Image (cartoon, grey):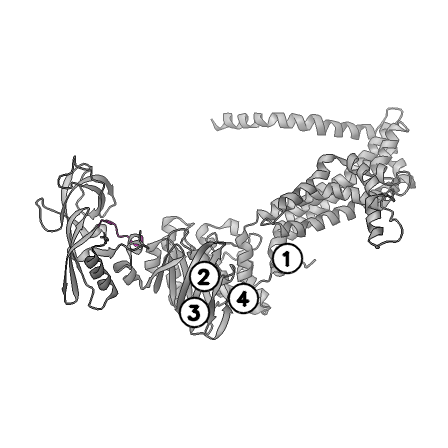
C-alpha cells in the first residue's frame, strides 16, 4: 500500500508507576510482513500494540518508519496522524452509523470527493464480502459480520500499518476459523504490513510470517511459526506452543557427537535419554554443557504426540504409567497419566505427570508403558527467568 | 402454559398500574374535568377563554418560558462538557459530585434562603466581589430574574449532569480510540461520535430539567418579584385557587402548563429522533 521499507520499534518501554508493562521491546517489520504478538493475558502484548498506535504514551524508546520518527517518548505523532489502522476485539463500530457510514468515516475526514468515497467504500465492502449490507446498522449484524465491517473500515484507508487486537476472540469457534482464512486471504491480496495480537497459538501459527512471544512484558522469542513451534527458546515458550511434560532433573552424562548433543538425564520421571540437534557453537549447546559441568538443574519439554504407547516391558526411555484422565478427541485421545515410579507407593501416587496423545485409547485407571523418542525431548537449563 | 405465564407476568404489573392510575391518571382526569366545568356546574370552555383573554395571565407563560428555557439550556449545555470531561473519572470526582448533589438534597426553600443572605447586597459574594475590586457597588442577585434563574439552575444542573455522566461513561471507550485511529481529532470525535451517542441522554435530561424549571414556584416567590416580572404560571394557578378560590380556573391553568410542557417535550424528542437517525451529518453546534 503506502510506500515504506521498514518499521522499527527500538527499546520500547512502558511503565505504570513501578510496574513495567512492556520492557525493552525491539522489533523490525518489513513491508508487507504479518507479525503476531503471542502471549497469555497480562503479558503486555496489547500494551505493546497500543504503544505502537500512540493511543498509549510510551515511557521510553523509539518508533520509526524509514527515516520518520513517530515517537520517542517526548515528541509523539498523535494516533490520528500516524495513518495506522486498528481493529478492536469488540469491533468498536459506531452504533449510530450504517455500515456504509462506518466504512466511509475515515475517508470523509480526509475530505475526499463524494464519488471517490463511494467508490472506495464499495470496493472495501466487496472485499470483505458484505455487499448488500451497506444500509444496515451494526446492531443488526452478527459478530463475524461486524468484525468484517471493522476490517473494511481500516483497509479502505490503505493504512501504513494494520493492527489487530485479538480480533477473533469474541467469535465462536467455527466463525473464528472462517474469518481467520479470510484474514489470511486478505493479507495475501493486499500485502498490508500487519501486527496481530492473540493468545491463541493456532491463530498465530496459521497467519504469521513471524511470531513474537511475550511474557511479563518481555520478548521471549521472535521467529517464524516453524521455529517457534519446533524450536522454542525456553520452557515458557515451549509450554505456550503446546509442549508438556516439564520434568525437572539433572544431566547425568553428556556426549558431543558432531552436530548432535547426547544427554543422559536423571529426571523426576526417571532416567531419560535426549538427543538434540544443536550444532557446535550454538548458544543452547553451550548452555547445556555449562549446566552439566555445574550440575545445575534442567527441565524437559516433550509434546504429548511425541510420546507413544509401546508393548509392556522396560526399554530405553520407557515409562510405566497409570492413566488418570482420558479425553476422547476424535482422531486421538489425550491422556493424563501418573507415573509408576520405581519404589513408589501405590500407582498414581507420584506427583509427576505424563501427558500424551495416542491414537489407541486407554481407559482411565489402566496401566501402560509409554516411550519417549530421544530426538523429541527438549532440555532447557533452569535459569532465573524460567523459575 | 405460556398463556398462564403471560397472565402471571401481567399481574405483576398491577401494583404499578394502580399506582399510576391513583396518582396520575385520576388527578389528571379530575383536573381536566374541573377545568371544563363552569361555576354553574355545566360544561364550559370559559376558564380557558378567560385565561387567554387576560394579558396579565397570558404573560405568565412567557415569563415562565423565559426562565425555564434559558436555564435548562444552560444547565444541560454545561453538563455536557463537564460529563464528557469526567467520563473516565478525574481526581476529586467524589468531591465535585458531592457538592453538586448537596443543593438537591437540601431542597429549594433552604437553598433559596441561603442564597438570599449569601448573594444579598450585604452577602459574602458581594463583599468578596467588592474586596477584589471587581465591582464598585453591590450587584443585585436577589429579588430579580438572576436570583430565580440561579436558584432554578442550581436545582436542575445536578440532575442533568448525573444523567449525562451515566450516559457518556457508558459509551465504549474503544469507540473514541477507533475514531482517533481513523484520523479524527478529539474535537471531531466528540462531534461525530460521542455527541450523537449522547443525544438520547441530552434529550431526557433536557425534558426533566425543563419540566422542573417550568413549574418553578418557591424560587420565584423567595428570590424573584412574584407580583411583577417573575410572576410565573405556577403562581398564577396558586393565586387562582387559593386567593380567588376559583378551582375551575386554576385547573385550567394547570392544564395549560401541562400542555406547554408536553409541547416542549415533543419538540425535544423530535430533535432527538432527527439527530439519531441522520447522525453522520451532525451539525457543529
Q: Which residue is labeled 3 in the image?
A: A8
Give neighbour class at mark 4: few <14, some 14-19, many 20+ (Cα, 10 Å): few
Q: Chain of mark 4?
A: A
The residue carrying mark 4 is: A74
Q: How far from the left and from the top, in percent, is residue B235?
A: 85, 35
Q: Which mark is residue B154?
A: none
**Residue A141: x, y in percent?**
49, 50
Image quadrant assignment for residue A195: bottom left
Q: Which residue is mark 1?
A: B191
Q: Is residue A243 magenta?
A: yes
Of the image marks 4 and 2, the number of the one nearer the N terminus: 2
Marks 3 and 4: same chain?
yes
Give the spatial CA distance, label 4 vs label 2: 13 Å
Q: In the structure shown, which secondary structural element does the residue marked by tag 3 occupy?
A: strand
Q: Chain of mark 1?
A: B
B228 or A108, nearer to the observer:
B228
Q: Earlier in the sequence, mark 3 or mark 2?
A: 3
Q: Given contact means CB atoms under 8 Å apart, are the residues at marks 1 and 2 in contact?
A: no
The chain holding disc 2 is: A
Amino acid at each position: 500500500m503506502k510506500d515504506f521499507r521498514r518499521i522499527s520499534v527500538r527499546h520500547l518501554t512502558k511503565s505504570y508507576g513501578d510496574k513495567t508493562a512492556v520492557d525493552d521491546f525491539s522489533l523490525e517489520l518489513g513491508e508487507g510482513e504479518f507479525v503476531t504478538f503471542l502471549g497469555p493475558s497480562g503479558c503486555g502484548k496489547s500494551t505493546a500494540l497500543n504503544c505502537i498506535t500512540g493511543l498509549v504514551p510510551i515511557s521510553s524508546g523509539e518508533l520509526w518508519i524509514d527515516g520518520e520518527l513517530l515517537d520517542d517518548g517526548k515528541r509523539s505523532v498523535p494516533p490520528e496522524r500516524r495513518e495506522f489502522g486498528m481493529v478492536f476485539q469488540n469491533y468498536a463500530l459506531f452504533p449510530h452509523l450504517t455500515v456504509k457510514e462506518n466504512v466511509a468515516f475515515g475517508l470523509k475526514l480526509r475530505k475526499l470527493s463524494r464519488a471517490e468515497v463511494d467508490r472506495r467504500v464499495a470496493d472495501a465492502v466487496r472485499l470483505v464480502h458484505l455487499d448488500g449490507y451497506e444500509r444496515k446498522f451494526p446492531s443488526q449484524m452478527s459478530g463475524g459480520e461486524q468484525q468484517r465491517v471493522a476490517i473494511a473500515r481500516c483497509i479502505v484507508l490503505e493504512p501504513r500499518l494494520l493492527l489487530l487486537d485479538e480480533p477473533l476472540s469474541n467469535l465462536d469457534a467455527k466463525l473464528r476459523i472462517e474469518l481467520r482464512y479470510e484474514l489470511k486471504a486478505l493479507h495475501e491480496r493486499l500485502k498490508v504490513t500487519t501486527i496481530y495480537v492473540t493468545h491463541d497459538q493456532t491463530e498465530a501459527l496459521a497467519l504469521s510470517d513471524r511470531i513474537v512471544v511475550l511474557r511479563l512484558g518481555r520478548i521471549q522469542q521472535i521467529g517464524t511459526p516453524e521455529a517457534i513451534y519446533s524450536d522454542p527458546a525456553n520452557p515458557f515458550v515451549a509450554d505456550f506452543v503446546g509442549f508438556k511434560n516439564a520434568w525437572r532433573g539433572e544431566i547425568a552424562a553428556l556426549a558431543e557427537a558432531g552436530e548432535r548433543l547426547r544427554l543422559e538425564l536423571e529426571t523426576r520421571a526417571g532416567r531419560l535419554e535426549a538427543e538434540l540437534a544443536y550444532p557446535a557453537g550454538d548458544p543452547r549447546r553451550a548452555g547445556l554443557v555449562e549446566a552439566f559441568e555445574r550440575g545445575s538443574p534442567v527441565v524437559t519439554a516433550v509434546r504429548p504426540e511425541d510420546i507413544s504407547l509401546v508393548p509392556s516391558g522396560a526399554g530405553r526411555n520407557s515409562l510405566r504409567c497409570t492413566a488418570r484422565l482420558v479425553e476422547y478427541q476424535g482422531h486421538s485421545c489425550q491422556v493424563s497419566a501418573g507415573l509408576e515410579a520405581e519404589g513408589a507407593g501405590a500407582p498414581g501416587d507420584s506427583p509427576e505427570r505424563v501427558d500424551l496423545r495416542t491414537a489407541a485409547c486407554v481407559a482411565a485407571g489402566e496401566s501402560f508403558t509409554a516411550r519417549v523418542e530421544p530426538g523429541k525431548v527438549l532440555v532447557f537449563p533452569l535459569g532465573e527467568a524460567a523459575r | 402454559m405460556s398463556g398462564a405465564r403471560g397472565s402471571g407476568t401481567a399481574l405483576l404489573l398491577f401494583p404499578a398500574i394502580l399506582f399510576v392510575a391513583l396518582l396520575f391518571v385520576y388527578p389528571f382526569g379530575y383536573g381536566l374535568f374541573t377545568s371544563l366545568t363552569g361555576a354553574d356546574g355545566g360544561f364550559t370552555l370559559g376558564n380557558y377563554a378567560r385565561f387567554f383573554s387576560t394579558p396579565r395571565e397570558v404573560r405568565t407563560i412567557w415569563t415562565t418560558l423565559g426562565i425555564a428555557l434559558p436555564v435548562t439550556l444552560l444547565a444541560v449545555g454545561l453538563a455536557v462538557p463537564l460529563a464528557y470531561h469526567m467520563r473516565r473519572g478525574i481526581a476529586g470526582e467524589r468531591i465535585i459530585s458531592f457538592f453538586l448533589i448537596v443543593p438537591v438534597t437540601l431542597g429549594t426553600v433552604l437553598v433559596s434562603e441561603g442564597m438570599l443572605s449569601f448573594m444579598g447586597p450585604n452577602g459574602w459574594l458581594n463583599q468578596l466581589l467588592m474586596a477584589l475590586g471587581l465591582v464598585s457597588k453591590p450587584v443585585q442577585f436577589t429579588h430579580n430574574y438572576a436570583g430565580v434563574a440561579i436558584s432554578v439552575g442550581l436545582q436542575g444542573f445536578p440532575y442533568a449532569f448525573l444523567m449525562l455522566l451515566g450516559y457518556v461513561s457508558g459509551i465504549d471507550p474503544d469507540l473514541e480510540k477507533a475514531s482517533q485511529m481513523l484520523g479524527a481529532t478529539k474535537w471531531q470525535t466528540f462531534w461525530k461520535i460521542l455527541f450523537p451517542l449522547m443525544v438520547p441522554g441530552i434529550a431526557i435530561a433536557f425534558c426533566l430539567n425543563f419540566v422542573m424549571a417550568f413549574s418553578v414556584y418557591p424560587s420565584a416567590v423567595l428570590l424573584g418579584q412574584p407580583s411583577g416580572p417573575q410572576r410565573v404560571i405556577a403562581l398564577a394557578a396558586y393565586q387562582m385557587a387559593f386567593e380567588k378560590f376559583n378551582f375551575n380556573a386554576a385547573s385550567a391553568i394547570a392544564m395549560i402548563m401541562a400542555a406547554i410542557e408536553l409541547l416542549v417535550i415533543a419538540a425535544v424528542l423530535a430533535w432527538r429522533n432527527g439527530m439519531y437517525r441522520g447522525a453522520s451529518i451532525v451539525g457543529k453546534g
